[in-house]
Image: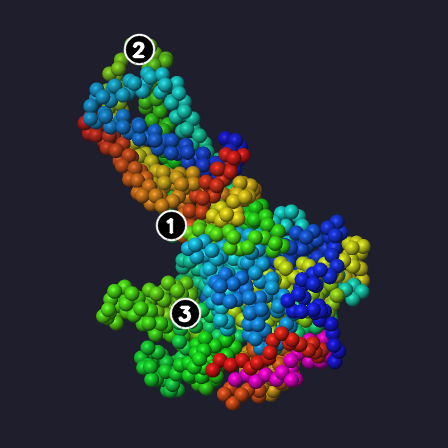
Amino acid sequence: MSVFDSKIPEGPLKDKWTKHKNDINLVNPANKRNIDVIVIGTGLAGGAAAATLAELGYNVKTFCYQDSPRRAHSIAAQGGINASKNYQGDGDSDYRLFYDTVKGGDYRSREANVYRLAEVSGNIIDQCVAQGVPFAREYGGYLDNRSFGGVLVSRTFYAKGQTGQQLLLGAYSAMNRQINRGKIQAFNRHEMMDLVLVDGKARGIIARNMVTGEIERHSAHAVVLASGGYGNVFFLSTNAMGSNVMAAWRAHRRGAYFANPCYTQIHPTCIPVSGDHQSKLTLMSESLRNDGRIWVPKKKEDAIAIREGKKKPTELSEEERDYYLERRYPSFGNLVPRDVASRAAKERCDAGFGVNKTGQAVFLDFASAIKRYGKEAAFSGGHKNPSEAEITKLGKEVVESKYGNLFQMYEKITDQNPYETPMMIFPAVHYTMGGLWVDYNLQTTIPGCYAAGEANFSDHGANRLGASALMQGLADGYFVLPYTIGDYLAGDIKTGKIPTDTPEFDAVEKDVRDKIDRLMNAGGKHSVDTYHKKLGKIMWDKCGMARNEQGLKEAIEEIKELREDFWANVKVSGTANSKNAELEKAGRVADFLELGELFAKDALHRNESCGGHFREEYQTEEGEALRDDENFKYVAAWEYTGNPREAKLHKEELIFNNIELKTRSYK
Amino acid sequence: MKLTLKIWRQEDANAKGKMVTYPIDGIEGDMSFLEMLDVLNEGLVAKGEEPVEFDHDCREGICGTCSLQINGEPHGPDRLVTTCQLHMRKFNDGDTIVIEPFRAKAFPVIKDLVVDRTSFDRIQQAGGYVSVNTSGNTIDANSIPVNKHDADESFNAATCIGCGACVAACKNASAMLFTSAKVSQYALLPQGQVEATERVQNMVRQMDLEGFGNCSNTGACEIECPKGISLENIARMNREYMSATSKG
Amino acid sequence: MGGLIKSSVAKKFAMALSGLFLVLFLAQHFTINITSVISPDLFNEFSHFMGTNFVVQAILQPVLIFGVVFHFVMGFILEAHNRSARAVSYVSYKGNANSSWMSRNMIYSGLVVLAFLGLHFYDFWVPELVHKYVESHPADATRYYEETVAKFESPVRTGLYVIAFIFLMLHLLHGFSSSFQSIGWNNKYSKGLRGFTVAYAIIIPLGFIFIALYHYINNL
């Protein structure tokens, strides 16, 4: 097992980034004009990187499968973005944000990267405000903050429940400015099909124009992959329907190591699956857990009666309810971190206490909050002896003012009124911490191929804190990658334009065309979705919230079989040379069917429980995650060798000089 | 639920399209409208027919990708939702549902129900930004206090998801609500003041070049907008535009 | 005219201003007409003043004619442009779910009013020009009332007038408040203003209808 270079600069933690920026090579403005960069994906990381690179003077081409860069799935983030501004004066600092992130990630992230993230976090807010992002403000006109799970300070900036959208529109507007200057060429409705290497360096891509079906060659001196995460390997997730791993997986197949694929975040508060037709899961903001109490019935008979519609949850007395989070974690209660809350819900449902038709849901109840707020409101309004009805009415008003839009969304989707009956929730796949391995410069193991945002294995270790994904995407895109890439591109000032009529491009294009032909001409028995759903079920059952050796071994076999069946029997209708959603899906599912196997392999090899990775064999007596720092304090970076199950493991040891490793406890 | 779907089918941008009728059965109220179309497509694929192409992505009402004119209204009969959040319980057993693409000269059909909305991108490119470098070397975020009311109004304008329902609903296929929402977002913030004159002129010019119609204040856009963007934005843009023009 | 004012927003602005001007004119016209119900002498006095005053005749009248012509020509230009903005029309378009009939059919209510204007000119303006400039008559400050009342002997003409005013009402119900939106006036006072415009849109045409019917009935 080789040791490879993460290029972490020398020196004290807090000086590393500054020193690094001073040390690396720069490209002079006149030469930047002669250098092309391709950016795949236009979410927060890709959009921000494209805008900044173009502004610096590089010629940028962006690619996204959506019809506009503005639609990337960064848009769906609700809660907010962290920054160590310490505007609230509650003792926040770069170090504290760094510490919280490393701890929240269960000590599986790189210190230097995380510190840099914390260091530039404040700049992100400055930048976004200057761009006209309408963050929430207080009456004094200054920026407002809220607090988020897992931390002790208020450092989250937000724009109501649409922070992701507003930040993405900020990056998109910066892109638009460069498009208007002619520095960015935007290729929308284009999908990257493969990466082209020339002399071992990333020199271009093969893309498919999704409107005409044309296969196009695009060359550049460097390729940035900001194509997001791979949560859709589970079929049902909170990701967008189109979110896929193709760009990252193609790069992996061409030589980029894939790190920690098994680290998946399962978000505890999603709307449960309602039936087999379901295509997508909807997240409800984590903030609901501030006031909602999570429970299932104490007795199985009651759970069954509720499932069958014979009993209503409101008919159960307090004694008949099991507030299992409050029972298991008295000090954190309903506010335990995401991974803990998710697993606890699964445990109860597996034990037969689930409360919806499918038995895969728990209650999130606002009745106590309505009562509590109602009493407070009545008291401060001068009612010393309010009636029950008055209390309920006032309490509902308070809850509505806090969560009105979420309650409304819940009602639209489920047709149930959460003011009258408890909400039903269940965990869902939400974010993937794993991704392409990158060094401190965000370069993958392929020279000239960079990865940013959720697409890289990132700064979140084994578990991501709320409101940190937006921070990382923008940090990578605006402030890290545009500088570190210069170090590499400085070697390319004399290269000149990369020609596309070369054998290297010919060969990759042929691969792409062959793959499309195979898909179009496969056996034609089952639809693409059939396979995707089967894959999702294997992943969810065996690589989901809790994993064990046997299940993972089975998963590896089952995924392989499914993949072979897919290539033999998939049915793709329509033609390859026109808009064809079935073909697009088929290409993506083909890659998920490979990634899934590596995912399971990674989960199988990691004989410990940490963050989003929970192995049933490795838990404490109370059922909590048991980390093994002695043997697994490393990043698992997998090298493709022709078959996912035979991927070669490379370990990057994680060195913690500034933080003491502790067991997370929320008791 | 048993339904009759009448869907616009069109091979590609240059082909002549037509309405095709599809009976569909087994639809449940809990399905979203797009999941209903998934069921239809699954059936079409099984029969060896080409599935209906439609735009969709996040399926949680925020990305603005899904469109569809459903029974004569963009995003269907429900208010303040996109098509992906429209649920089948809003329809009754036996209903006939007419499904068409968003229609506008500036939104040419690509295939079936998929239209090209890049005209919206070009309007934004004409000036929908603040010309600040992304270096991060700007002043501290809190050194620009913004009146809360203005900040909230600006946010409300910025919630536009660019889906194009305003254009689809408007009898004139006007893009005024979309354009004015972006103009308003910046007009209400101090950061946007410096370029205000050029911004509104350039964006309106581009909007006109794209071939959108005029605003005749029917208010259809506001009613059909899944994000409830207010007509006040259009008035604000008119004001901004005329004052910019008078400045030259 | 469309080429002169290039942008869509400026066109609508101009359309709104000309509309508002015509609304003002309507008020003035109504004020004089209603006197025909109250006092024939007063009506004659006003009419004579309007017909002979130099400022009214040489300045206001051309401005008015320009306003009228501008408003309908611009209306046609906008309508043509708007129609071209949707090359393929919907099979199903449920306009009444999101907008008023008036707002969607300004061109038709406008066309009816325009047709009425033709009749009105034929009835009053042409004879007036002939009277003043073609034939030579001695100045007579008392002829107006009789001439006006005589027009309402015909039930057909009276009926046409009533129908035209109903369409004018529909046109104003949307147009008056809409013009404030077009010139960028939408704020906390808009709700109140809207109430006023609706009242105006109903009362003024009803007033005109009342005058027409009053004279028709008197003629019976």
Residue bearing the label numbered 3? A414
CB under 8 Å between discs 1 and 3: no
Task: Say whether residue C190 is visible.
Answer: yes
Residue B225 is a magenta residue: no
Badge 3: few (under 14), some or many (20 or more) residues near its Cα, within 10 Å? some
- Residue extending farthest bottom: A621
Counting from the top left corner in percent of width and height, residue B2 is at 42, 67
Indicate the colouring scheme.
Answer: rainbow
Tell me if B116 is positioned left or right of A1 in this view: left
Figure check: C204 above or below A242: above
Residue bearing the label numbered 1? C96
Q: Secondary structure at mark 2?
A: loop
Residue bearing the label numbered 2? C137
Counting from the top left corner in percent of width and height, residue C6 is at 53, 35
Name the residue rendered at 61%, 84% in the picture: A628
Which amino acid type is marked by label 1? Asn
